[in-house]
Amino acid sequence: MAQIPPYTDDFFKGEPGLLAVFDYEYEEIIGFYQRLRWAQFLFFPPSWVSVLCCTPCFLNQNIEWDTRSRHLALTVDGIKFVHAKRPTLCGLSCTDKGKESKTVPYDKITDCDVQEPAGTACCCCIRNILHQVTVDTASSGATKEGVPRR
C-alpha cells in the first residue's frame, strides 16, 4: 500500500473523504513567476503604461496571493483542486476573486502527463523550473494521442 506523503497545507483540514493533501512548492512558484512577470514588464515597453495604475507596485503581492490560494488533494470522489478566495489588483475587498473548485472523478481520468521543466520562459533569461501536470478526462477534448480536438 502506498504511503500518504506528509503535508503542511491545512486548507482541507476536517474535510470528509480526504485521502491525501499535496503541498505546492509555493516559494519556488512565487519566485519563478515574480522573475518572469518583471522580465515581461521590463522587456515589453508598452506595459510601462501600467505604471499610471500602480500595477508594478502590486505585482509581487498579486503573484503571492494567487499562488498561495491554490490547494490540491485526493478525496474519495477524485482529484480536488481549489483556488480559494483571494485579493487581486490593489488588495481592496471589492476586487477580490471568488473561490473556484474542481473535482475530477477518478473514473473519468483518461490520461495524466507530467512535463519536466526545460529551457527558458522569457527571452532566454528566466530558466523554467516548474513541472506541469495535465490530467485528461473523456470530456476534456483530447484524443488518445494527446492532440487537442478542434
Image (cartoon, rainbow, N blue to C red):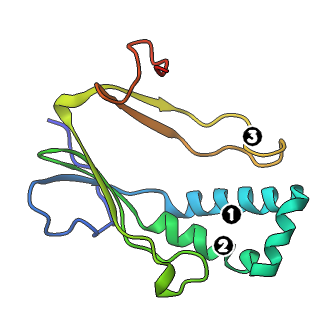
Q: How many labels were placed on the picture?
A: 3
Rendered image: mark on residue 60: 2
Q: How crowded is mark 1: few (under 14 residues within 10 Å), some or many (20 or more)?
A: some
Residue 86 screen position, x and y as percent: 44, 74
For disc 3, the marked residue is: 120
Please say if the residues under marks 1 and 2 sit with CB atoms less than 8 Å apart.
yes
Q: What secondary structure is marked by label 1?
A: helix
Residue depicted at x 58% and y 58%? 28
- Please state if 31 lies on the left or on the right of 57 as rendered: left
Quick one: 83 or 98, which is closer to the camera?
Answer: 98
What's the residue type where badge 1 is placed? Gln
- The crowd level at tag 3 (other Cα within 10 Å; few <14, some 14-19, many 20+) is few
Residue under label 1: 34
> As drawn, is 63 to the left or to the right of 9?
right
Residue, x 43% and y 34% (percent of image)?
A: 134
Q: Where is residue 63 in the image (x, y as percent from the top left)?
A: 59, 67
SS at circle 3:
loop
Classify the position of the N terminus by image quarter: top left
Mark nearer the N terminus (1 vs 3): 1
Dot 3 or dot 2: first in sequence order is 2
